[in-house]
Amino acid sequence: MDLIEIVFYAFAVLIVSSALVVAVSRNIMYAAFGLMFTFFGVAGLYVLLNADFIAITQIMVYIGGILILIIFGVILTTNIAGVDIQEGPIGKFRMVSATLITLVLFAVLLIMYLNAEFIVGSANFGDSTLKALGTSMMTKYLLPFEVAAVLLLVALVGAALIARRK
Amino acid sequence: MGVGLTEYLVLGTILFCLGVFSVLTRKHAILVLMGLELILNAANINFIAFAKFGGLNIDGQVAALFVIILAAAEAAVALAIVLNIYQQWKHINVDEIDRLKD
């Protein structure tokens, strides 16, 4: 059991336990913090997979952007001040059927992944992926890059327009 | 034995199924959004694992980058819609918001 395995399983435990908190917890703020730890664990996993730029982008965009946005959304949509935001219980039929669907999906995907014979190779990214990412963004993926920029502008204007106070 | 492609894919599957469970079971709209973010992160783990182990090389990381960009844009617009719904109905219980126009 070498160090990479230990680190991988440590991050995996962090990710799965935090995602369990997100999926099961009644308290919205607990779920938001569980989401934050999930994002941190995933960023650590990215570093393990030689995706250093994506890991930092994950921390900055997901934790520093989307999670803050979600917490602001929670703050702005509470009715009662000073009370922990709770979510009510759900019906038995819905819980059982959702668990069944999830387990079937998990079983199908697991069987598929354990039986598939992927052509495995190990990519060598060198010191940092930054140069390769930048080059491919500017040559091979130029059109999606520009379209993504326009899409972000549209999302910005649209979100500001939709959420304005009438 | 080492940590190979399969371990990362199984982890992505677990995260994906927890996200699907969240989307199916939760009543608060923002908790549904959190489940959606879990699903997107699971797909990203798959992309990056295939970039390292499965032959996608840098293209897998570019795909993951675009997923992060789109997740940010979609979270912003979704939360704007949630705020609007809250202004109108004073709650965001997705079970009870079932009409287009009141």
Image (spheres, rainbow, N blue to C red):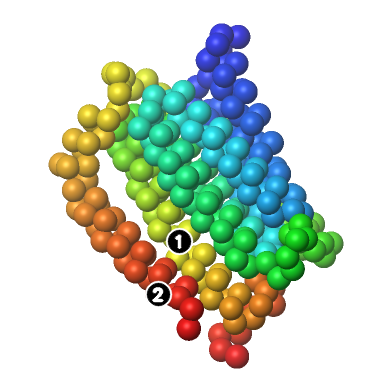
Q: Nearer the viewer, residue B75 or A69?
A: A69
Q: In this view, does A28 lie above or below B55?
A: below
Q: Residue furthest front?
A: A82
Q: How crowded is mark 2: few (under 14 residues within 10 Å), some or many (20 or more)?
A: few
Circle 1 chain: B
Image position, residue B58 (x, y; %): 29, 33
Q: Residue furthest top?
A: A2
**Number of numbered discs visible in the structure rendering:** 2
Check the residue under mark 2 and report the chain it is in: A
Name which residue type carries label 2.
Answer: Leu
For label 1, the residue is B76
Q: What element carries label 2?
A: helix
Residue in the picture at 55% in, 11% down: A3
**Does any portion of residue B89 appear in the rendered image?**
yes
Q: Which of the numbered marks, if any, corresponds to residue A31? A: none
Q: Can residue A115 be seen in this view?
A: no
> Looking at this rendering, what residue extends furthest in the bottom direction?
B102
Q: Do labels 2 and 1 share a chain?
A: no
Residue at 22% in and 36% down = A134
Q: Name the residue under label 2.
A: A161
Residue visible at 49% across and 51% down in the picture: A66
Q: Which residue is drawn at 35% across and 32% down?
A: A53
- The quarter of the rendered structure image containing the N terminus of chain A is top right
The secondary element bearing badge 1 is classed as: helix
Type of the residue with mark 1? Ala
Q: Do the residues labelled 2 and 1 touch (CB within 8 Å)?
A: no
Image spot of residue B55 (x, y percent): 34, 29
Between the residue at mark 2 and the residue at mark 1, the CA separation in whole angstroms equals 11 Å
Image position, residue A87 (x, y; %): 76, 61
**Relative side of A95 to A120, left or right:** right
Q: Quadrant of residue B54?
A: top left
